[in-house]
Image (cartoon, rainbow, N blue to C red):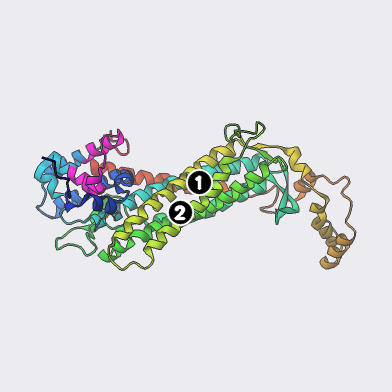
Amino acid sequence: MKKKKKTTASTLVGKIAPEVLSFTAGKDALLDHVLIEPDCIGTAAHVTMLAEVSDVLSRVEVGKIIGELVSIMRRSRSGKFKIALRDQDVHLAVEKALSKALGATGRKVHTARSRNDQVALDLRLYAREEILCAITEATTLVDVLLAFARKNAAVPMVGRTHMQPAMPSSVGVWASAHAESLIDDLSLLRGAYTYCGKSPLGSAAGYGVPMPVDRERTARLLGFDAAHWNVLAAANSRGKTESVVLSAMEQVMLSLSRLAEDLVVYCAPEFGYFVLPPGYCTGSSIMPQKANPDVPELVRARASSVAACCVAVNGVVAGLPGGYSRDLQETKEPFLNGVSITRSCLGVLGSLVAGLHVDKEALRAGFTPGVFAADAALRLVAKGVPFRDAYRQVKADPPGTAGVSPDQVVASRRVPGGPCDPDIGAMRDASKEASRFARRERKRYHNSVSRLLGVRYPDLA
Ligand code: ARG
């Protein structure tokens, strides 16, 4: 007799038609792999608190659960813990593994929580670590740009508006301008980090539970500043959190795309101001002479990708009612993508700029006589001529540039934040402070998790 085709798949939370399961789970079985550690850490905090406030779990049971959670984390790191479509998502996969290993003890862990607060928590824990990494990577790029600016502080570079030659400037100004833009973005990343500072754990499905769960306690165990006051606000923070983090990332990417575009243009042979480091250009399959700036081109394009991720998240969140809706699952992929794209762009540009070669002659050759016109007008002003008259005079009769050296002009322009004085010291301090902040916060989190798990985190030794 022919075997009947299975019409339902058994899951931890009921039977479901396979085609429906693959539709509703979407890409969770794949995407949720990055949430395995946050999920285990959140579960450890939850069971620790449960044992403190109730008789649901004993201390011995909590010890066993945490031991198993650590084992899941280790297995996941060596590729041996996989989330299957049948599991639906990381939360059910971890719960299933705990139940399999510990029987009734494992089947108790979901007391007084919901996947809604679990996923909101996991994503926050993930976001907090990623933001700190992004801050560190951004400060590394800032430091590289500042070192480049210092080394080339007085190297003349035409300042441009409308891409046309405009005023004398320097490589120092160019590089440290990009650094300052990123320093300004650091405050947005830090704002996003602060935004992620409240723990949603214990809000359960979004309405709390009739048990004395201690949300402040789990928040502290996980290194958060506090728990959400309102259980529904905790649930509603899903999606908004992702949007806030991506908005900060989007601004970082806007800064990077400007830097990338400058690199594409100024490395083109017609300018030749800079030469990309070997290994950062790609050849052409047909034109032997080519060394293409694919890396900055892709950074430029990926700024739009991150903006699109932000739009995708906002599109889901806008118009949602209060309380959990499955729509929120759709924010996961653009969120994870946007964060990972931003971090990889920060990383690649850091090493690219570190190896950037400066062609001083090409930079000097870019100085057309017009670049000195505004300076000439201002020299007349110094002699008492009203500016508008000086402007007209220079326009009608441009002074010759014989004997004018871009190097001298740049060297004599000692205005704060201008060529030769791009106020690198203050920027370096700002970068150091941000990098210290990220290190301190990461350490604080790792210490909290180490205490919670009873093994050193993140090494799990
Ligand atoms: N995978 C789900 C998500 O990302 C987890 C939460 C499921 N909650 C529910 N009520 N169906 O949103």
Per the image, the residue denoted by label 1 is 138
Image coordinates of residue 80 in percent, x first then y, are 26, 34
Nearest the viewer among 2 and 213 is 2
Q: In this view, does 261 lie to the left or right of 335?
A: right
Q: Does label 1 point to a residue whose CB lies under 8 Å from ligand 1?
A: no
Answer with left or right where residue 54 lies relative to residue 36.
left
Q: Which amino acid does label 1 sit on?
A: Ala
Range of magenta residues: 69-96
Q: In which quadrant is the C terminus drawn?
A: top left
Tell me, for residue 189, which label it has, or none.
2
What amino acid type should be assigned to the residue bearing mark 2?
Leu
216 in magenta? no
Q: In this view, does 103 lie to the left or right of 404?
A: left
Front-most of 18 and 33? 18
Is residue 416 placed above or below 233 in the rendered structure? above
Cα–Cα span, label 2 and label 1: 10 Å
Where ligand 1 lies, by image quadrant? bottom left
Answer whether residue 78 is magenta in the image: yes
Q: Residue at x 65, y 48 (%)?
A: 174
Query: Which of marks 1 and 2 precedes in the sequence?
Result: 1
Q: Residues within 10 Å of mark 1 (few under 14, many from 20)?
A: many
* Percent coordinates x, y for residue 349 in the rendering: 55, 42
Magenta segment main secondary structure: helix
User: Looking at the image, which residue is at 42% across and 48% down?
Assistant: 337
Label 2: how many Cα within 10 Å (few below 14, some 14–19, many 20+) = many
Query: Circle 1 — which element?
Result: helix
Can the viewer see residue 13?
no
**Horizontal and vertical percent position of residue 447:** 31, 43
266 up-or-down from 181: above or below: above
**Residue 413 at x, y = what percent?**
75, 51
